[in-house]
Amino acid sequence: MRKSWYMFFFQVPRVPEWYVRRDDYEFMVTAMRQEARSEAFNETDFKRYRRAWAQDGAITAMLNWYRALFRHGEEPPRERVTAPTCVVWGENDQALVPEMAPQSLDYCDEGTLEQISEATHWIPHEYPDRVANLLLTHLGS
């Protein structure tokens, strides 16, 4: 619950949109900077993120994903993933605890798990070459 406080805040109408936008999206930038490895993001990355976040409806769409989690209390579908699946997981992910990684494979007919011990929630930014190689290997098989 402590790790997910923001999900509760995002349930409030309009206030989270205002808060996230203020100070040129500093809430988002700070969260990314604090959680990721120091070299994961640079100012060009944040400039691009800010431009994407500023698009009409972008922030509300992002927040609506969290809002839907609370508003649709029914159990999610538990179908099997039949396509070969590669799950890449950061063991230092602040939101998605490592124990969830092997549980995710339980829904895959043919799944592999690649856990990166040093990675956080921002794996593609932290380890772009490693992620690209994992994807190329997976897609080539």
Image: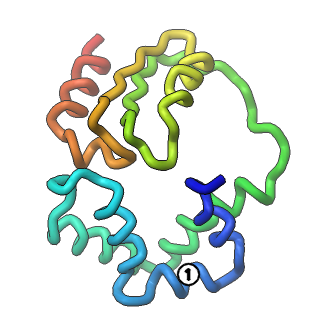
Q: Position of residue 58 (x, y in %)?
A: 48, 72
Which residue is rendered at x = 19% and y = 31% of the image?
130
Which residue is rendered at x = 50% and y = 48% of the image?
95
* Residue lying farthest to the front in this orientation: 2
The answer to whether any part of residue 119 appears in the image is yes
Which residue type carries mark 1?
Glu
Q: Position of residue 31 (x, y in %)?
A: 39, 65
Q: Quadrant of residue 70?
A: bottom right
Q: Quadrant of residue 80?
A: top right
Instruction: Classify residue 56 as left or right of residue 47.
Output: right
Q: Position of residue 129 (x, y in %)?
A: 15, 35
Which of these two is toward me, 83 or 109? 109
How many numbered marks appear? 1
The answer to whether any part of residue 65 appears in the image is no
Q: Quadrant of residue 3?
A: bottom right
Which residue is rendered at x = 30% and y = 18% of the image?
138
